[in-house]
Image: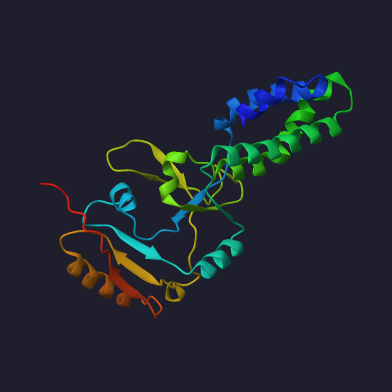
Amino acid sequence: MRQVAEEAHATSTGIDAEILTYLSEWLGGLTSQSESVYVLSMSKDHNKLSQWKGFTTYGQGVCLSIDSVLLVKRMQAQGWTFQNCRYNLMSQLTWADAILSRIRREAATNYSGIEGEKKKIFDSVLQKCLPDLLQVAAIMKHRAFVDESEVRFISPMINISDSWVSYRTRPGRATRIPYVEFRLADDPENLSIDEVMVGPGPEQHLVKSSIVTSLKENSVRAPWRVSLSDIPYRELP
């Protein structure tokens, strides 16, 4: 977004140039914002070697496949949206430019010509456009990750002090990571999983047996199936 703003600034004048300068500075401090969006990340590809290697421990990975219609209904019920991640730079710049054009237009329209009110007007326009800015930011990924075929469910803006926000830590790290729950079902007995795929590993059939037992014990609604990845990936000794 800063790149687009700086390029547009080169040919802008007057109030338009001022909003672009202010926007670049504002984006630089965006990490301190108290409101953020949260994402639920999924992949359209359920059996890819790079995913098993990158996101699971060898011999312990599973892939849950959940009906997309069910997911969209749950998303809508909780006020979330969803988008495919964008890996292409030109596509990313096009989205950024569309949001930037709206900000510039609204700032120019709302500016009254009173010098002392300029910052107040700019802040008001940026706060109004912040949900769109964060939605766009949440789906931009570097092109090196294109193999992930990622789809993201994106929450509405949530304040860090909201009671919905909880924290988790990763083993061996001190950083606290904020998260919010995305409910896949109102009741555990209504949880519907189409398939559980057991990832590559030396004891796939034992893992499959334990998963079948767990699904039954937790009353996961049938029909479901448990399958084995056919990727011949083995960890070197």
**In the current view of this chain or complex, which residue is farthest to the bottom?**
223
Along the line of sight, the residue nearer the viewer: 225 or 181: 225
- Residue at 65% in and 39% down: 94
Along the line of sight, the residue nearer the viewer: 202 or 23: 202
Classify residue 218 by image quadrant.
bottom left
- Residue at 52% in and 48% down: 85
Along the line of sight, the residue nearer the viewer: 53 or 158: 53
Along the line of sight, the residue nearer the viewer: 166 or 4: 4
- Residue at 44% in and 73% down: 192
Classify residue 1 by image quadrant.
top right
- Residue at 64% in and 23% down: 25
| Residue 121 coordinates in the image, percent (x, y) | 79, 30
Q: Is residue 100 left or right of residue 221?
A: right
Asked if residue 9 is positioned above or below residue 227 in the image, the reply reads above
**In the current view of this chain or complex, which residue is farthest to the left?**
237
Asked if residue 209 is positioned above or below residue 105 in the image, the reply reads below
| Residue 74 coordinates in the image, percent (x, y) | 55, 65
Asked if residue 86 is positioned above or below residue 227 in the image, the reply reads above
